[in-house]
Amino acid sequence: MTSTSASWRELLADQMPPDLAEEIDVYEAQLDLRRAGKIDERVFAETRLRRGVYGQRYDNGHRHDGTAAKELPFPSDGLTKGPDTVWDAPGMMRIKIPYGGVTPEQLDVLADLAEEYSDAILHITTRQDVQLHYVHIDDTPDLMRRLAAVGITTREACGNGVRNVTGCQLAGVCTTEAFDTTAYSDALFRFLLGHPDCQDFGRKFKIAFSGCADEPCGLVRMHDFGAIAQVKNVDGQERRGFEIHVGGGLGTTPYQSKVLYEWLPAEELLPVAQAIGRVFGRLGEKKNRNRARIKFLVAKLGIEEFRRLIDEERAGLTEDPRWTSYLPEVDSFDEEPAREPLALGDDVPSPELARWLESNVYRQRQPGYVVATVALPLGDISSWQTRRLGEIARRYVGDHVRTTVEQNIVLRWVSEADLPALHEELVAIGLGEPGAGSIVDITACPGTDTCKLGISSSRGLAGELRTRLATRAYEMDEAARGLRIKISGCFNSCGQHHAADIGFFGNSRKLDGYTVPHFQVVLGGMWRENAGSYGMAIGAVPSKRIPEVVDTITARFVAERQGEESFQDFIARLGKKELGQMIAELKTIPAHADDPSYYTDWGDAREFTMGDLGVGECAGEVVSSLDLELSGAESISFEAQVAFEDGDLVKADERAYAAMLAAAAVLVRAEYPLIGSDPDQIVNEFRERFYDTKRFFDRFAGGKFARPLFDRHAAGAPAEPGEDDVRYLLEETNLFIDAAHQMEIREAGAQSAAV
Amino acid sequence: MPDVGTSRVGAKVFAAPGASVDLPAFIPAFHGWIQRASLEGLLIDVADYQHVPDGPGIMLIGHEADRALDMSHGRPGMLYQHKRDDRAPSLPDAVRRALRQAALAAAEAERDPALEGGPAFPGDELMVRVTDRRAFPAGAEGSAALERATREVLDGAGLGGGGLVACHDDDPKAAPTVFVTLADPPGAAGLAEALGQAPPVAP
């Protein structure tokens, strides 16, 4: 290609699929209409979100620069791309990579786009997407065209639709899978993309595939819709099908999925997914987005009633040839290796290579071939590295590259004999680090780096932990080295902390009159068995002391582990009370005057604030005593968790309710000291003073965190509380208390700003 | 080859050979630059990419352009990468702007007390690239055009007289990139001044 003044639209006209090209033209026209003020900003926001064009931190045009909240004077002249979202503010572009499959040609284009429109960094997400940050909205149409020309779409990467379809990165080469799910995940991705029955959801809808039940790769149990491959003998013939899950999800309150069908024939996969889409679109919550994920609908209806509705809906669907037209082509997804399957030589590997072989290489079920994991620190890879990695892939594996939910990239079909040379080439571009899937391979969402919702710096913490652990990972006991750490910047769980051995999510607390970044510690989540169970929060610790938390827990695990005891069993054996005591001392920090470094976050020189309101932090006596009293509510919540762990669900339910009530009373008492202990009075006063006035509302979650108190108060104590119900109530109680802290911080900030 | 113009030109002023760089120190320094509006244009935020080998290091994200204490090409340097413009300037104008802004940022780093003991930027080793594959695709033609524009700018600023050596990136898929070595190091501030404007007074 030679230099030209032609546009990308003209240059790529013959390379883009016509439907994608037309969609992008329409999108570009909508940009023009919005610039001309002919589209409402809310409508435009949803339009761009459905094309993967997301907002980013500070896009309201304000930023606290460490001294004060300052306006960012973008030249937008009042033009917005959504409510409170300045047109010229940089944003994020999310790019869908179905089941993580990406070719070297696509890697080249992604590298170019990151370099030209972003910051020369590609970020791999926990859902196998690629994200580019600091992208200007004016650049997005051309960016989409260049992706379309290599078969990639950003459509429905964000917004209330079907998001990327994820799948095990080992599909097709795995030793434990029932069969390769790639063709099925690809078919479902294409079938639901833009499907009319999936355009009226109240919230997003995430799908995952797994080849087996026991391994973690697909993480099916934490998805809205999940499919686990199963082969069944029917009338003497082996038939492919899936165990179908619905209603899983993380977010503020994590839900484990329910089994919708224990076995569904493969030919029913697409029509059943369509039926689920129709039922969710029709019955799912629309007004309250905090209750709009399908997990709430499934929980509300019960799985039996939900199943009845899906059966009924499925029976009434009009036949669509696409349901089965892909089935004869399933074998076309079989992959051809680029190289001969030669065995690894007998040479003794260097210590560096030996470590990499041990942690980053998985032996395929096809003899002579392995999967090599390219561990990406914090999920980041530069444009330069991406281009070089594409070249390496071409030489060793051809098109067989996938992204992973642990924010890495795998090269499949590596001939064993090529491993030393491959490792050497990866080392040359800084991608030969060992430790994939170990304690140093930390997952983190973008957090406060770029996310509007981030509270604490998940990436900053991940970087710090990685640096500290990398230096001594190979001196650690193997059991501790194999633990997984996952970090989210807030309660929304994009870092998947609930499913980690050691998880953290960002929050904040008032200490010494200052707002201090904290992380809630969540221990004992299960990554295996498709995220088989979630961890339990045991307390919030200041960010700067989190490395000590990791040291304390891992040291104790190594010292007190019984035989081959799993980390989950170890955590369960210690119990919440003991774990709480273990981190109790780590909740303290020096006074601000003695060491202000504790009042900043990792990787950020600015004194910590909670957004634009976090100014000054000069809390008065009332605030301090209020904070102290809220810690009493936290203690009651802790009692609830201990009761739950002991199997006393009635007590756990009662204590959780009491904790919320206590927190509500603390807030009310600060304004109305004569409040008594009557629950009706407390709830009524709380509702009137803090809910109806929206003072308790989270900026993004609204009044969501108050609802559990109202609901539990209205319903009274259940005669026989269900385990799931109590577990959700415990999570919601923690979030209620957190929300009380946040309200106090917001209002103290507003006060000091006014002063 | 027609001069189609472009805004997306980047330039890097390499640190002195062998200079050791304390990357974390650039985080508070760049935050300070935002607070004091030390550089031209709208400065927005700081991005930490220390964990990316040979990557962008610590970035100072802006509206019109990003700056970075950049670690790519195996050596630290101050990078300026222009992103936005209402109209595409000619390639030489874009090169001049990128080089001058990179030099201004390098000079600011040399002056900043928060970076005391940090790297010096002699200004005699430069990189210029054009990251606009529509107007200037990867390949010899784009690199040649960029080299011509770079020579024109440096000669015009009186910097090429002592001898100017240029070479291209050996990666055939890389954006057109030219590495330049000047015979006489003008210093970061001198480079900025020669390219059109004296650096602002230190805050």
Image (cartoon, coloured by chain):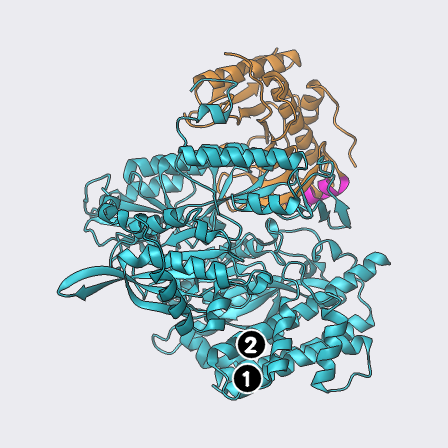
Residue at 24% x, 53% y is A364
Q: Which quarter of the rendered picture does the C terminus of chain A lie within?
A: bottom right
- The image quadrant of residue A598 is bottom right
Q: Most extreme residue toward the right, as rendered? A: A755
- Label drawn at residue A652: 1
Residue drawn at the location 66% of the way across and 14% of the way down: B157
Point 36% across, 37% down: residue? A104
Residue A219 appears in view: no
Q: What element carries label 2?
A: helix
Seen in the picture, residue A319 relative to A302 is either above or below; the reply is above
Q: Percent position (x, y) of residue B1?
A: 50, 11
Which comes before the other along the chain, label 2 or label 1? 1
Relative to residue A108, is residue A482 depicted above or below?
below
Type of the residue with mark 1? Ala
Chain in cyan in the render: A
Chain of the residue under label 2? A
Q: Which mark is residue A730?
A: 2
- Residue B103 horizontal/vertical position (percent): 66, 27
Q: Which amino acid does label 2 sit on?
A: Leu
If the image is split into quadrants, where does the N terminus of chain A sit? top left
Residue found at the very far left of the displayed protein: A236
How far across and how far down the image is residue A138, in percent?
Answer: 59, 34
The reply to whether residue A679 is visible in this rendering is: yes
Q: How far apart are marks 2 and 1 (CA)?
A: 8 Å
Q: Nearer the viewer, residue A404 or A597?
A: A404
A397 falls in the magenta region: no
Depth order, front residue of A443/A12: A12
Are the two marked residues, 2 and 1, in contact with CB atoms closer than 8 angstroms? yes
Question: Which quarter of the figure has residue A620?
Answer: bottom right
Q: How crowded is mark 1: few (under 14 residues within 10 Å), some or many (20 or more)?
A: many
Bounds of the magenta segment? B27-36
Residue A484 lies, in percent from the top left, at 44, 62
